[in-house]
Amino acid sequence: MFSSLRSRLWLSYALLVVTALSVVAVILFIYLIRNPFLYRQTLEKLQAVQTVVMERDGQSMSTAAERASKTFSVRILLFSADQQLLLDTYANRESELSFPKQKIIPRNIPIARDEKKTAWLYTIEKLPDDSYIMVAAPRPRVSLTNVFTDDFLPLIVQSGVIALLLSLVAAFFFARWIADPLQKVVQAARQMPSAEIKPVEPQGPHEVQELTRAFNGMILRTQASQKSQREFVANVSHEMKTPLTSIQGFAQAILDGTADGESSRQQAAQVIYDESARMHRMVLDLLDLARLDAGTADIKMSSVNIHALLQAVAEKFAPQSQRAGVEIKVAPMDSLPVLKADGDRLAQVFTNLVDNALKFTPRGGRVSLSAALVNGGMQISVSDSGAGIPEAAQPHIFDRFYQADPARRGGEKHGAGLGLAIARELIQAHDGRISVRSSPGGGTSFDVFLPL
């Protein structure tokens, strides 16, 4: 019955309200036992008699006191300024009442006791001549039943029940105020994963609103991830389609005898080999990305001499740069400290960057490699003098399978657009960052920042 959050919240608030009202009722009952209505009524009578005596209409104080005592059946005492008894209208002198002593903690109901320990309710007032008038009456006997039925029960019925009902109604709306936004989040969560789901409007207390905003952020990230996965599958399918078509076509040519000459069969075999190698490289790149995404990539940290690493990369591309007519220059790097990094992975990153730079730099151009200390880290730059990257393409240059316009791509043989994505993941695995600076006609520079 109370399995839902709303009902449990309501029950909790209801129990708190009932507990609070119960405490109030107990305190009220104790107060009424100590100060019942009959006591208060008697004190009001004594105060009224005291007022009548003090007015006295030309009579002496003693005469007015004796008369009021008989008329109202009360005991009236007069005390001198030094608190000595002057008059006592009570006939029984064996129960003498002395001047009431000042108590440290005064009681709500003033009670005095005579020599026989009989309790009297009283009021006392100082007169203009510094004497005192005291009006007393025997303390009425009150039973718990009378207190409960005459005083306590009417108050509880009139105020307690109404307060309880209003509190329960307020608790119900308060529980809804908290639970309803959470219920909307639950309903939205049940629809996940869905591209059509809408963010939930933040409502309710601050903490619930924060939870809703976090949930909305999760929705957006999930939808972006789903979109990325769909695009990833589409891109992989597209990239695989071209080499598979070539492999299938030339294999069919060999099988049905279309490639009947030695040169034709050699060409068909070469195409099959090249396209399968291309697919193999793409599969390896995808495996690298998957390991980097999962955090299981094999990163082995050791001391790396950046100048030696860049020099080795430049020497590796020396034959290719000579054929392309592009100069590769490594800037002097004196007094650079060694880095703690994975040398093989950094070589993979800079090999990819230099390979791209050579592809997109025209004959007679230059590819430059440099490194310097910047802001407590080391920045390594690979720059070319090519045509540059269009400004609209720069925010997406590190996206998987993204390739700029065909003029820069240089043909399908240059890859599937995974190299820069892998480079970014490898640099991030080193707690670094990679960025691009480029302008049309002004060349391109990839900057890699690595912490020391």
Image (cartoon, rainbow, N blue to C red):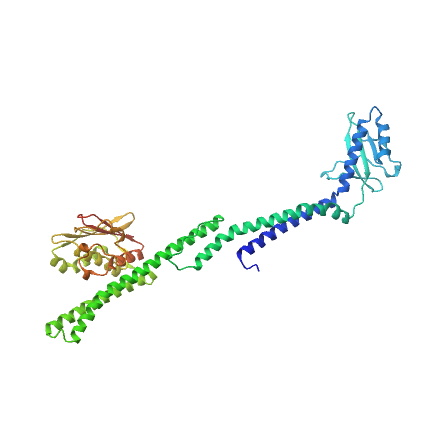
Residue 6 occupies which quadrant of the picture?
A: bottom right
Going by the picture, which residue comes out furthest to the front? Answer: 196
Q: Is residue 388 above or below residue 40?
A: below
* Residue 414 image position (x, y, % from top left): 19, 60
* Residue 62 image position (x, y, % from top left): 85, 28
Please state which of residues 288 and 220 is positioned toward the viewer in this rendering: 220
- Which residue corresponds to the image point at 22% horizontal and 58% vertical from the top-left? 352
Going by the picture, which residue comes out furthest to the top? Answer: 58
* Residue 115 image position (x, y, % from top left): 84, 40
Inspect this view and state whether residue 424 appears: yes
Residue 133 occupies which quadrant of the picture?
A: top right
Q: Is residue 237 left or right of residue 161?
A: left
Q: How many marks?
A: 0
* Residue 346 image position (x, y, % from top left): 25, 58
Inspect this view and state whether residue 300 appears: no
Quarter of the figure with the N terminus: bottom right
- Which residue corresponds to the image point at 46% horizontal and 57% vertical from the top-left? 187
Please state which of residues 304 and 134 is positioned toward the viewer in this rendering: 134
Q: Is residue 364 left or right of residue 26?
A: left
